[in-house]
Amino acid sequence: MRKIKIGAKYIGDGEPTFIIAEAGSNHNGNLGQAKKLIDAAADAEADAVKFQLFKAEMLYPENCGFIEMQNAKVDFFDILKKMELPLEWLGILKEYSEKKSLVFLCSCFDEESAESLENIGIKAHKLASPELNHIPLLEYLAKKKKPIIMSAGISKLGDIEEAIDTCYDRGNKDVVLLHCVSAYPTPIEDCNLNVLKTLKQAFDLPVGFSDHTLDPIIAPVSAAAIHVNVIEKHFTLSKKLDGPDHFFALEPLELKKMVREIRNVEKTKDRLAYAQNLIGRKNLDTVLGIYRKIIAPSECDIYPNDKRSIHAIRNIKKGEILSNENIRVLRSERNLNAGIHPRFYKLVMGKIVNRDISYGRGIVWEDLLNGG
């Protein structure tokens, strides 16, 4: 297995676990709060801090609907707009992170965001689970010849293989694969950390776990006990802050405890014995689970719609030609039907539709039959 260098850090067997403190969008649109998150990650002695760079319109159609949040129904697109990270922050946050001896990472969700990260000299690109099948984006990132850390929640083995092959086919073999369960929070019985052994054997690359469980210790310590290469965990300044990602994230003291225990595991000769003594045999067996890559029970309801597919980004009239002006690779959310797989994006370009298509709807093959 090749080791992958990100900044001054190496990821791979024989190296310390690369710990990513996932700040995500928990800055709440406040630059001062974003810097305090970086302070907390540095104080916890994580290796990297990670934010998210997206534009809501590049993720979902505006009519993606309402979600339940903090005992109220809220417009999901509206929430996403408020969570966007301003472009002018990127250089500031990167410089501040590096002054704190942290690798600055930022998930990107579209080509334009990826280019903005390239412009500040990002050391690696991070791909979120729903983007694993966004083949056009993966092709774009692979050509940048930077390491790619890809999360593989709500995915099957074939989805992962296609994503890795997409990078390899474009000459980029610096790929790190993170097992993940895209449920917020994730029940520990759905973690199935043993699948990391399967993924490492199948793909011969560094692997890790992007953890969405509530507990700061059980899953991270167990993952370290089986010698994973990367552990990623969401954190916040306070679980009581407004926003969809605070309630399941770790607070600063919990993050610090998690990092400390991961390092303690690394120092022991019998890692599994240490983990069992710390969290108990039952918890260890539960979180390790099975060796097969499956859609976890807690992910089943989002699997059909939270991956990317081809959608109309405005009303399209019968007889119109599909182009970048009227279609985009987007997620569906619960009230919209998914469309054609993103791998066919170039193929459907230039095709004529045989019926009216409403804004936000997934483009399906039936829209194109006998349509040119």
Image: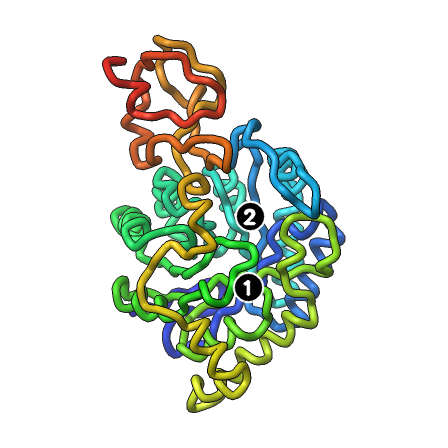
Residue 107 vertical placement versus 115 (above, below): below
Tell me: 7 left or right of 369: right
| The quadrant where residue 348 appears | top left
Q: Are marks 1 and 2 in contact (CB under 8 Å)?
A: no
Q: Residue at x 74, y 47 (%)?
A: 30
Q: Which residue is mark 2?
A: 120
Q: How many marks?
A: 2
Amino acid type, mark 1 = Thr
Q: Residue at x 59, y 69 (%)?
A: 215
Image quadrant containing the N terminus: bottom left
Residue 267 on image: x %, y %: 49, 87
Tell me: 364 left or right of 284: left
Of the image marks 1 and 2, the number of the one nearer the N terminus:
2
Give the class, few, some or many, for how many residues have Cα within 10 Å of label 1's Cα (few <14, many ≥20). many
Residue 69 on image: x %, y %: 66, 45
Q: Residue at x 54, y 31 (%)?
A: 64
Name the residue furthest bottom.
269
Secondary structure at numbered mark 1 = loop
Disc assigned to residue 213 = 1
Q: Nearer the viewer, residue 142 or 160?
A: 160
